[in-house]
Image (tube, coloured by chain):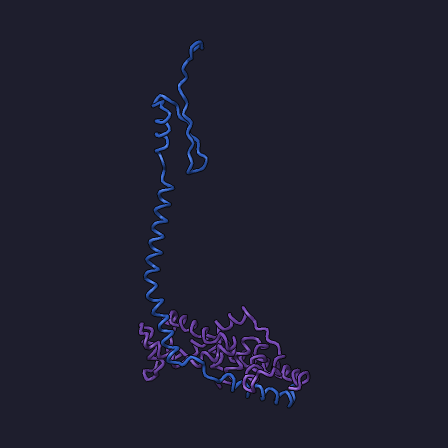
Amino acid sequence: MPGSDHDSNVGQFEERLRTWGGRPPSLAPAFAASRVVGQLRERGAATPWLRLAAVAAMMVAIAVGVWRTAPQQQPLAAAVAANGSGATGDVVQFWLDPETPVYFVLQPFKAEKGERS
Amino acid sequence: MSVSDPIASLVVAAQGGDLRAFAALVERHWAMLVRVARSVVGEAEAEDLAQEALIVAWRKLDGLSEPSRFPSWVTRIVFRRSLRRARRREPDVALTSLGDPGHTPDTESALYVWQVLSRLAPRQRAVMHLTVVEGMADSEIGAALGISASSVRVHRMRARERVGELMKGEQTHAGF
C-alpha cells in the first residue's frame, strides 16, 4: 500500500512532468502546418507520374510475357530449311520444357558406294 | 455534426480536399500532438513523428465519420505511431547522469523526467501525459488511445506505482 512518501514522490514527479511535458514544440504551429501541407502537395504532384510509370512498366511486362509464351512454330521450319533436307526429311520433336522444343531432322537413308541399299 | 463546431467544419472542408482547412487543423492541434509524441518517444523524434502522423491523417481523413471527433482521432494516430516507434527502439537511459556538471537545473529536471518516463510502458507514459499535462478526463484519454476508461485508470495506477518505486530507489542510491 503506497504511503505518504510514495504519494509525495509521485506528486513531485507529476509536477516536473507538467513542466517538461507542457513545453511548446520547437516548430511553430503555423510553420508546421505549412510544412505538412507542402509535403502533401509534393506527394500529390508526384503520385500521377508514379502511377503512369507503374502502368507503363506493367504493360511492358505483359507484352514481354505474351511474346515469350506465344507458341513458336518458326524453329521447326528453320531447322528443316537449314538441314537442307526439305520436306523429304523426317522430323522428331522433343520438349525439354513447355518453352523449349528440340528438333531432330533425320536424313533419308541413301546408300553409299559399295553399300547395299 | 454541429455547424457551429469550427473543428468539424474544417474537417468537412478538408474531407472535400481543402488543404487550407487541413492546414488550419494542423495549426490548432500541432502543439498537443507533439507533446503526446514527446511523452512516448522522447524529445528527439517527437516533431518528425507528429508530421508523419499528420500526413497519414490526411490520407485517412475520408474514413472519419464524425468530424467533431477529429482531436481524439488524430491523437490516436499519433499515439499508435509513437507506440510502434517506442516498441521498436526502447530507450536505454540510465539514471546516472544527473550529477553531471554540464547540466543546468532545467536540463537536469528534463532529463530526469524522461529517464523516469522511459522506464514506464509506452501506454503508461501516454496515460500519465494526457492526465497530468493535458488534464484530460479518463473517457477522453480512452478515446484518444483506443482503450476503455477503466483501462486508463489501471494504466495510471500502475504508472504511479512504478514512478513511486523509481523515485524511492533513486533517493536511496543518489540522495535525490
Q: Chain A in the picture: what colour?
A: blue
Q: Nearer the viewer, residue B101 or A108?
A: B101
Q: Residue at x 41, y 73 (%)?
A: B54
Q: Nearer the viewer, residue A53 or A71?
A: A53
Which quadrant is home to the N terminus of chain A? bottom right
Depicted A103 relative to depicted B131: above or below? above
**Quarter-wise, where is residue B96 in the image?**
bottom right
Q: Which chain is purple?
A: B
Pinpoint residue A59: horizontal percent, then vertical percent: 34, 51
Depicted A15 relative to depicted B115: above or below? below
As drawn, the residue found furthest toward the front would be B102
Q: Nearer the viewer, residue B111 or B10?
A: B111
Depicted B20 relative to depicted A46: above or below? below
Q: Residue at x 42, y 27 (%)?
A: A104
Which quadrant is home to the C terminus of chain A? top left
In the image: residue B150, left or right of residue A33: right
**Quarter-wise, where is residue B100 in the image?**
bottom right
As drawn, the residue found furthest toward the right would be B172
Pinpoint residue B12: horizontal percent, then vertical percent: 33, 76
Pinpoint residue A52: horizontal percent, then vertical percent: 32, 57
Callout count: 0
Q: Residue at x 50, y 85 (%)?
A: B133
**Quarter-wise, where is residue B92 in the image?**
bottom right
Pinpoint residue B87: horizontal percent, then vertical percent: 54, 70
